[in-house]
Image (spheres, rainbow, N blue to C red):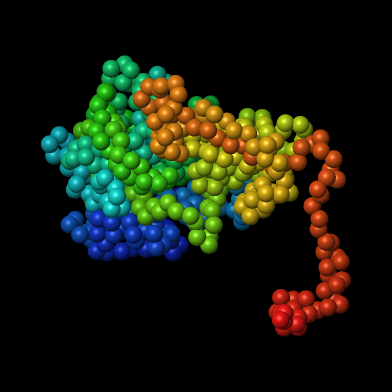
Amino acid sequence: MAYKDLRDWLKQAEELGEVVRLEGIHWELEASAAATMTNKVIVFDKVPGYPPGHRLVTNLAKTTLKRFFLTSGWSTEARGLALTKAWMERMREFKPCPPKTVEGGPVMENIQTGKDVDLFKFPVPRGHEKEGGRYIGSADCVIVRDPDTGRVNLGTYRMQVHDRSTVGINFQESKDARIIMDKYHQQGKPCPVVALVGVDPALFKTATSHLVNVGGLEDLDFVGWLKGQPEEVFAGKYTGLPIPAHAEIALEGEIPVGKTRPEGPFTEWCGMSLKKDLPFIEVKTVYHRDNPILTVTLGREVKPPGPEGLRMEFHSSAIIWDEMEKAGVRGIRGVARYGTRLTVVSLHNLYAGHSRQAGLVASQVHAGANSTSYVIVVDADIDPTDIQAVVWAMVNRVEPKRAIQMLEYCCTDHLGIMSPEAEQKQEPPLRKGGFYVSRAIIDTCRPVEWDPAWHQDVVISQELKEKVRQKCGALLSDEGSAAKLPRKR
């Protein structure tokens, strides 16, 4: 069912039982703790110190299938690897839905400029006691325009509030927005920017999807395609950038040349980041709706997984799978992306070097290149969404010297560096902002030249098991064997 904005989406998600509303929870740490206790979207209202109606929404990033189907206007009965393939095929049906230019919209109900700008009028949260401040941007959509091509880019980047009209901006080194900002700065110009800090899930999904910028693909076209209707935008008064008319809160300004301010620490996907000098946005204009909703990511915990195990994300898995096939890799049975550092590829190994080719390509395609540490390639009999089977293949089918290949000088950013020593001791000396990382390809596929009789898997046929089961019945069930077998003394 189509939706126009966050409020419309929340109403429909609530009807699906996917929303919980809380009142009186403090923006200082409490909201973040609450976010760890449910996967549902939380709407915080009556936040202490703020007027009723000035709301805070979190857990948009914890996407359930119900919410994903609502966001994408699509659904399927497929699950597991079939779901990843179905979404990949759905994305291949993409048809541009260009934005519609309008004179204004609900986000212009309130406009502040100059000395009237005050970012603390919103219930900006602090998510952890070790964080360096309050973050207005963590489930946001940052808009910039390439000065050479005119292409508009959407991305999600963390933003710490420094004061009433200044926010830090963490454009990681290999991201499109960083490349665009550098182009402006190399010309001696500030970088125009709009930061949407109250967004609907279609804008947020597009901003976090690592879409490949080829063939004239425009990010706002993808937003409209997800929603099933053109995104209505107007030109910002200060930057001229397109601003979605139905956003909740939009910050318009510029990133000055050569200026930084200390930012952080912040709870990133890789752990608690360190304080670092980063660029910042000078906010010139704030647009917001009546009773605005601030969207944020809270409750992030970086620790070993519990009984639920590693989380596989089918949306990013589908994008990597699609990019690999477009790069010419054949015989892919499936791809599974776990978190941000591990990609698993299941492959029909067709010729010598095929499995290694697949691993190398998976490690470098756009959607997986920035933060991947490991790519594991498994034979087609292994389901990549079954992490237990993947680990079994890695343990039982790998001769380490042959199977593990280390790659050096792979692209990353300061968040992808695995140790402080790696950041400090990179050789040769690098200009500020240059980072490389190593990456491992673990090829568990049987080489095609090996004798197929070597170390075959061994399985007792189901027919024989059933024949014996009929003879023995309950004696061979777990309950029966426990009851009948003599105890050891």
- Residue ranking furthest to the front: 489
Q: Give the answer, above or below, for where 156 lies relative to 309.
A: above
Q: Is residue 250 left or right of residue 438?
A: left
Vertical placement of 1 versus 254: above or below? below
Q: Residue at x 54, y 29 (%)?
A: 408
Image coordinates for residue 34, horizontal then vertical, percent: 34, 61
Q: At 26% across and 45% down in the image, what residue appears? A: 132
Q: Quadrant of residue 89?
A: top right
- Which residue is more in the foreground, 177 or 117? 177
Q: How many marks?
A: 0
* Quarter of image, res 171: top left
Rendered view: 150 above or below 350: above
Asked whether the viewer can see residue 322, the reply is no
Rendering coords of residue 459 (x, y %):
81, 58
* Rendered view: 413 above or below 199: above
The x and y percentages for residue 341 are 52, 42
Which residue occupies the foreground of this view, 1 or 87? 87
Whether residue 316 is visible: yes
Side of 229 where 342 appears, left or right:
right
Q: Residue lying at the far left in this picture: please name it.
A: 115
Q: Residue at x 71, y 81 (%)?
A: 489
The residue positioned 45% from the left and 62% from the top of the image is 16
Q: Please state if 243 lies on the left or on the right of 309 as rendered.
A: left
Q: Is residue 109 left or right of residue 233?
A: left
